[in-house]
Amino acid sequence: MIEPGEYIRDIFTKSPGTAVTARGWVKTRRDSKGVTFVQLSDGSCFQDLQIVIDAGTIPENVLREATTGACLAVSGDLVESPGAGQAVELKAKEMTVYGGADPATYPLQKKGHTMEFLREIAHLRPRSNTFGAVFRVRNALSFAVHQFFQERGFLYLHAPLITTSDAEGAGAMFGVSTLDMMNLPRTDAGAVDFGKDFFGKRAHLTVSGQLEAEIFALAFSNVYTFGPTFRAENSNTPRHLAEFWMIEPEMAFCDLDGDRKLAEEFLKYIIAYVLDNCAADLEFFNKRIDNTVLSTLEHVAASDFEHVTYTEAVDILLKAGRDWEFPVFWGCDLQSEHERYLTEETFKKPVVVTDYPKEIKAFYMRLNDDGKTVRAMDVLAPRIGEIIGGSQREERYDVLLEKIRTQGLPEEAYWWYLELRKYGSAPHAGFGLGLERMLMYLTGMKNIRDVIPFPRTPGYAEF
RNA sequence: UCCCCGUUAGCUCAGCGGCAGAGCACUCGGCUGUUAACUGAGGUGUCGGUGGUUCGAAUCCACCACGGGGAGCCA
């Protein structure tokens, strides 16, 4: 095992003259007559360690195996590098090859590959520059999420992944069953008898931890969930996954203004964290993936988000003098083209839109005094559209019950959700952030399948 | 799910009715403290699949599969 202080990122901080051992995988190799250069990476940082092997130092049969893709341990002295690309390099004295890699068949080349090709070799793509950077940023982002909420005293809640609650309604759900599909038990009426299933009733993978988070917010005040979420929607876009990670804070004693301010503070915090801790990776994204990433992130971290109500947003869109593919009117749902116009053209930064018509938002969102709008918010970001969706929740028992009834929802399924309003109810609010959407924003990566280790999409669940 | 576009060497692509091509990778060699090194030579194919049109199909048509972009649904 590589111990703390021994990663390649640590080796770069040591003084020339220090004896070190580096372990990792060969990115590339260049041969000269008297000297061989090997670029070695252990994934700990963007920069590879340059290994310099003077002819004759390492036995021929060992050195021959140290080709692109091979796994090595190299011991020697850290020295100042006369070359331009790095301050220090490792002058090899000893080398062990753990595993070779036949150059004729190893698929990762020195030159660039398409993201589509790399996706087909998901077992090797983490060794590439791009995916090394993606997954280091993903790691840093996840840490920043916990640090942000923990610093503020939020309780980390593990919402269940399997649910028998029929109440979430955030999208199509994957069924969870151990029934023999070739021989399904039937009720007298001929329907599948889920009473004979593992849980004694129909079970699904969760589409959101929000309702469970509300339960905990009404006991621990400030809580958050951070875990995988599943949607069985047949969505084939660069922004959707069937399995993705979501962060859902829920705060008691909080209204929509508090919710919106927390969302802004949260986004700025995690952006600043990644800017501070993944500088080399972000520079790479800025250079090779999207040359607007750094300036956008720095801008967003430093500036105040715009805030408009839905009604104001509709006014802006009506005055835009555009031929919208989807007509704009008060009561319409904002389409991609509208969201993009607001965030990319009108304001050129993240925009929070609040107070949507109740008809186009979920039943649990708190009704405003006008009786027409609800305390909902969407945070829209340039390039990727909606990144956060949230709301103040309806905490009034009678109003919530009425909403459930008028929307024709199964009242019995919500018995515990209603009881939260019956016993010690409190104003509360929360929001949801898709981790992968945020990563796309941070890295400039164009396809959500390339910011999660092993993407699951309709028709695809390899690796 | 809908609308467009694509699928040819390991990779990226050209060829668009008449001999299957290039660059890179790879192998062997030259040169060189190199940085996606440079350089000479060499091998590389079920032209996504199945049917059809045609004297002849990588090329035209149909269907299917897969990939990309856009839309819807959403995070």
Image (cartoon, coloured by chain):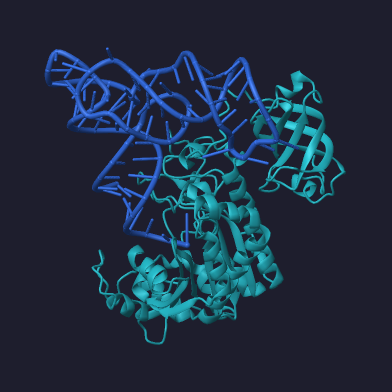
Residue A439 percent location from the top left of the image = 55, 56
Query: Which quadrant holds the C terminus of chain A?
Result: top right
Please state if A277 lies on the left or on the right of A406 as rendered.
right
Residue at screen point 25% across, 63% down: A325
Query: Which quadrant holds the N terminus of chain A?
Result: top right
Q: How many marks?
A: 0
Residue A9 percent location from the top left of the image = 75, 48
The front one of A257 and A197 is: A257
The front one of B16 and A205 is: B16
| Residue found at the very far bottom of the displayed protein | A369
Residue B1 percent location from the top left of the image = 29, 47
The reply to whether residue A214 is visible in this rendering is: no
- In the figure, what tint was chain A given? cyan
Residue A301 location, quadrant: bottom right
The reply to whether residue A370 is visible in this rendering is: yes
Q: Is residue A44 above or below residue A170?
A: above
Residue A83 percent location from the top left of the image = 71, 42
- In the figure, what tint was chain B given? blue
The front one of A194 and A161 is: A161
Residue A146 location, quadrant: bottom right
Please state if A159 lies on the left or on the right of B65 as rendered.
right
Residue at screen point 57% across, 35% down: A110
Q: Is residue A422 above or below residue A238?
A: below
